[in-house]
Image (cartoon, grey):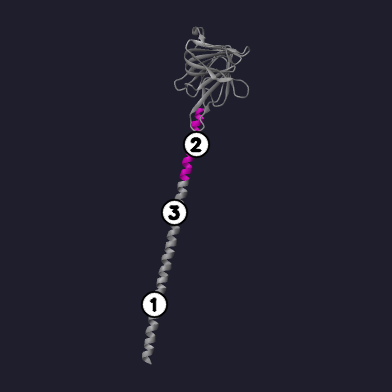
Amino acid sequence: MAKQWNQLERLDHKALKKLQVEREKQALTQKASAEKKRIAIIAGAVVFCLICAIAFFVVIRNRSARNKFNEERAELYKSIVVEATGKTLARSLGDWEKVAKGFVFTEDYSFKNEKDGFLVVELQWKNLLKLHKNSELLVQRPTLDEKENKVNKENASLVKGEVTVSVALDGRDLLEVEAGGVVALGASGLYKVLFDNAKGTGEIVVKNGLVEVYGKSNPNKRVKVSGFYKVIFKNGQISGPPTQASVIQYDWR
């Protein structure tokens, strides 16, 4: 009987030890699983922080790039009065006001000279508009490329009187000067536009270089005018082919 009890005790001891081992194994497994979850949570948090940091960096960089793009674009709209003598006036939408050398503008602006006035506007690419006495000129905001910060076109409109246009090397084929429905596009050199708004007549005289002239009603039909030649126009129509011009009769300041 004692022998049987000893056998039962040994069996119970083995079963208890086996159960203890299994419980310890389960505990270790649970601990390992909990550790993996903890590590996964920490790793996820780190990855999330990295993603947030990268996203923040990208947003800041894009914002900085956009701000720089907008600042550079704003500079391209600027034109400046580099010379103003006598009675020179200017206005955007309101009344005419006295304008002086150094005046910077970024919107459409009209300029007017009295009988003793002379004014020079420098555009973005150094093209010059020299407005003579008893004259009025509208300088329009340049047309910029939609995607890049570059000037695609510069425009001015002579309301009356006389303007001398000096085309810079960097400003070739950019500036169009309109008067009475006729447009002069300077490829190079120095030319002059004169317009009598009361009669609707005018002329475009080229001292040197090359200018393309066309009527706004028919922009595909263009006349090339070179140095020492001019074209006459009336009521928005070019009167004929270029004719020789005595350029010394004109004021080329």
Determine which residue is flagged by label 3: 46
Give, as a three-letter code, the residue at label 2. Asn
Query: What is the crowding at mark 2: few (fewer than 14 residues within 10 Å), some, or many (at least 20)?
Result: few
Give whichever of discs 1 and 3 has the lower sequence position. Answer: 1
Residue 198 is marked as none
Image position of 30 with respect to 43: above or below? below
Position in image of residue 235 (x %, y %): 61, 14
Tell whether 97 sits left or right of 2.
Answer: right
Give whichever of discs 1 and 2 has the lower sequence position. Answer: 1
User: Which region of the structure is painted magenta?
Assistant: 56-76
Per the image, label 1 sits on a secondary structure element best described as helix
Residue 67 is marked as 2
Determine which residue is flagged by label 1: 18
Image position of 3 with respect to 111: above or below? below
Q: Quarter of the image holding residue 199?
A: top right
The mark lying in front, picked from 1 and 3, is 1
Q: Residue at x 45, y 58 (%)?
A: 41
Give, as a three-letter code, the residue at label 3. Val
Give whichever of discs 3 and 2 has the lower sequence position. Answer: 3
Per the image, label 3 sits on a secondary structure element best described as helix
Q: Nearer the viewer, residue 91 or 189?
A: 189
Position in image of residue 130 (x %, y %): 52, 16
The residue at the far front in this view is 221
Q: Residue at x 41, y 65 (%)?
A: 32
